[in-house]
Image (spheres, coloured by chain):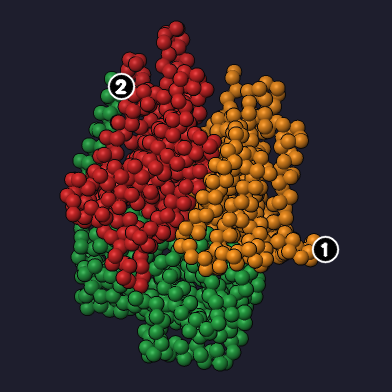
Chain colours: A green, B red, C orange
Amino acid sequence: MKKLRWILIVLLVVGLLLSACQAQPAAPEEEEGPFQIAVVMPSSINDLAFSQSMYDALLRVQEEMGGEEAMTFDYSDGMFVVDDAAAAIRDYAAEGYDLVIAHGSQYGSSLQEIAPDFPETSFVWGTTVDTFGIDNIFAYEAASDEGGYVNGVIAASLTESDVLGVVGPIETGDAKLYVDGFVAGAEATNPDVQVNVNYIGSFSDVALASEAANTHVAAGADAMTGTAQMVVGAIGVAEENDAMWFGTQSSQTELAPDVVVANQIYRWEVVLNEIIDLIGEGTLGGQSFTINLENGGEVIEFNPEYDLPEDVKDLADDTIQGIIDGTISTDVSE
Amino acid sequence: MSKPSQENWYAKLIDIALPIFATLAALIVGAVMLLLLNVNPIEAYAALWEGAFGSQNALAETLVKATPLLLVGLGICISFRGDVINIGGEGQMIVGAIIGTQVGLRMVDSPGWLVVPLALLAGFAGGALWGGIPGLLKAYFNVNEILSTVMMNAIAVQLMTFLLRGPMIDPAQAELASKIPQTARLMENFRLPRWIPTRLHLGALIAVVLAVLVYILLWRTTWGYRIRSVGQNPDASAYAGIQVKNYIVLALVLSGAFAGLAGVMQVYGVNYRMITDGSGSGFTGRAGFNGIVAALFGQLHPLGTIPASILFGALLVGANKMQRVVQVPSALVIALNGLVVVFVVSSEIWRRKRQRRRLAAEMALQEGAPGESDGSEAAHYGGEVD
Amino acid sequence: MISDLFSMTVLVGILASGIRLATPYLYAAIGETFGQRSGVLNLGVEGQMLLGAFTAFYVAIQTGNLWLGVLSAMIVGAVMGLAMAFVTVNLQAVQGISGIGFYLFGLGLSDLLFQRVLGTVETVKGFPKFNLPVLSDLPIVGEIFFQQNILVYISFALVPLAWFVLNKTTLGLKIRAVGENPEAADSLGVSVARIRYLTIILGGTLSGIAGASLSIALLNVFQQNMTSGLGFIAVALVYFGAWRPFGVLGGALLFSLVNSLQLWVQVLGIPIPSDIAVMMPYILTILVLVISVSRVRAPSALTKPFKREE
């Protein structure tokens, strides 16, 4: 008997909850005032990598547009759980934000589902080129292979041991593109060079990233690179062993000013500005953008502290120009 | 069965209210942290409530979050009752999802009424497999299940990454340079029905029905009796002729199976594809761990796990909303989650004390009456049985 | 390519990096061994490590004193241990769950502090390689064992010390008695509560050092969730080592060596998919246990709260 009652209570609770569900969600309010952006990001805004590159870009966009009067943005960082991110995206859209940025390739599926429910809101998804043919979704990606290629060219010109090391997270997406570009650039410059690549299977295991770098050093590497937030462990190893380091996504110079040669930096504002302009004109999506060396969305930042030989600097500049002109192909995209 | 009385109801009510008070106490400590971050705690907690229960969509999200917690929790009820500590829920969810997704990806020409049940069964089987391995290792090679399930979690994550960026990758992604590690999207007729316009899916109801079935399994069948008996006293069980090893394996197989089902339901009910961010919890949302907490809040009782999962799901969903509204780092949400777990689990002592007092009073009343055997077995997990 | 694995450089590389990687596991797992020997399972090791790692880093960067960093990490670890002990001993909470709670708390709080106090990833000048006279100059052996930072040496020295304490001292006897038969220990006048407080706080302290060994010795940075599951592996290694310090050492070395081996497998271009290579240490740890078919029993009172009969 008592058990039966238990079951009844549970059913009653569930029934009550469901019936409470009848209320309609509040309609998004049309607001005068600043342009409102919401962004959902997988890691933390100060990861010195992927998420920080977007956060910093938003700060720059805000400044260019004229501060908080003109544009405000809210963020959810650390949203690595895909369905939590989906809930956040839907919620931001329902709150009436003008632009909702899903900054992670794993969020695409959710966006595909949510965007049609909010035809007045513009969504943007990266990194990808796929807008699903939905006309309120923009897409963006980084041609990270281009900066990778340039870094590879410089590394291969500077190495004395002819061995380079790469520390990657998992073999996919932006990371794989960057690594493949680096390998291609290095091999095109110096046929004798050997590039050892290590994927550690994690975006967060700083200790293993550091040990991967140690392995590269033991294998003779005198220049290394790596991508994603766990490489901060590898940079320390480079510094300790006086090996050159090449950064990507955000500037990593400050972590090891003596050994960082160059960084590929993402400047998403190039894409964001364009998207904000389009929204102003009434286009809410349907286009995809790529940041690359040509449009200034990717910049190679040389560490001023590092004494880069003149001829290598020239070679790097020529390579950048060659990629922009299309005379050099990174040869990684299929 | 003792007769339900007025007092009994009152006692029950307090037992149920206890974890809620503990949660409130944890939120008060959280309020101090919020104040330190220059955030008005009242505003923050209003947002938390709003996010968990404030609207149709909020309620639905709470239940969506609660579903995998309940399913994993049901498995935990079984294994912990059998004194097997399964902390491999994360890996079991992943493997269940992998195998279940295969069904939907391969049987594209079959009707939905066939594919969906088959996929759920496949997920169940996948989880059973991933739980069964530590079960066999424990029973026949004396490999501790905490060790093996921790390791199997890590193995499952790498297996998922390997499959999703290789053999199982979305053909559309395989052609792009970005190569997002995800499978193709499930056909529309392969998706679990939803309570439109929310994400609440049929899986929630299935999970509740299964909770009843697990209750029946544990207390109304020989299998259940033996699992509990082995958990309580393996030596006596062996003496009584129970094949202890088989029931250790069974406990882990069933436990894994429910986690596997939770995994496959995330695919067929929520995401419509399998996707990874390189970590395990990106896919599971830590349900493999949080389900353990939910089951213990539910006093390792399948029916108690239902409200416990909803409470916990509400907290997770509401805390995310709070993060958005008052713009605190998501790290605070995790810390708060931890505080709630510690406070609730600590509050159990008062429930146990009350229970002991009641038991003593009953004993005094009816000296020599046949005692209920299932009162003490889960005592060291704080479990309670009707 | 596979034959490259057996060259001297590679072997020395694997061993040296295996020893470095084993260090945080050793601190955390030895601490956990004391706890479990007294009957307490602490799944919160990872949270204690993260808070320890952050504290050590922050104090080191503020004061420039690395030892002060280690000391602060120990204190923070001990405080976390104290809280765990109160919840476990006095409130008799379910140990597996309270541990998960403390893990989440440490994970969140360390990240929160990192974001609010430091704001960005920085580096600190950590413990340098500490060369021992003569030993460090030995060919091969010196390179593998004696060109490490001081926290590495201490972690290995901890193993025989822990063995001695557990097996050769009265305190060790009390700890084991409390873990095996708390009722009997109690009746002989051993305070079960006091012993468990002691071991849990000790475990927290060592987990704090484990965190410090990452943030100011091995890696010299702090990053959110930088332990990345290391604390859970440490708990698993206690089971691998069958609650014996030298067994734990074996487990930590096995796991770490295979991990550095898989890094080399990738570097040498041996054609195995990277994800499969990453699985190797996990699979091998299980396999070794299967083959060795250990018959060692867990401490009888593990996870069971002690209630004094009145």
- Work out whether residue A282 or residue A27 is closer to the camera in this orientation and state it: A282
From the image, which quarter does the C terminus of chain B lie in? top left
Mark 2, other Cα within 10 Å: few <14 / some 14–19 / many ≥20: few
Mark 2 lies on residue? A2
Residue C231 appears in the rendering: yes
Question: Residue C188: horizontal and vertical position, in percent?
Answer: 70, 22
- Work out whether residue B380 or residue A212 is closer to the camera in this orientation and state it: A212
For the point 38% across and 36% down, the residue is: B254
Mark 1, other Cα within 10 Å: few <14 / some 14–19 / many ≥20: few
Mark 1 lies on residue? C134
Residue at far front of view: C3
Looking at the rendered structure, the secondary structure element under dot 1 is loop
For the point 54% across and 50% down, the residue is: C284
Q: Amino acid at mark 1?
A: Val
Residue at far right of view: C134
Question: Residue C177: horizontal and vertical position, in percent?
Answer: 67, 29
Vertical side of A35 occupied by B217: above or below: above
| Disc 1/disc 2 C-alpha distance (Å) | 77 Å
Looking at the rendered structure, the secondary structure element under dot 2 is helix
Count of numbered circles in the view: 2
Q: Is residue C68 left or right of residue A172?
A: right
Q: Quadrant of residue A98?
A: bottom left
Q: Between tags 1 and 2, which lies in front?
A: 1
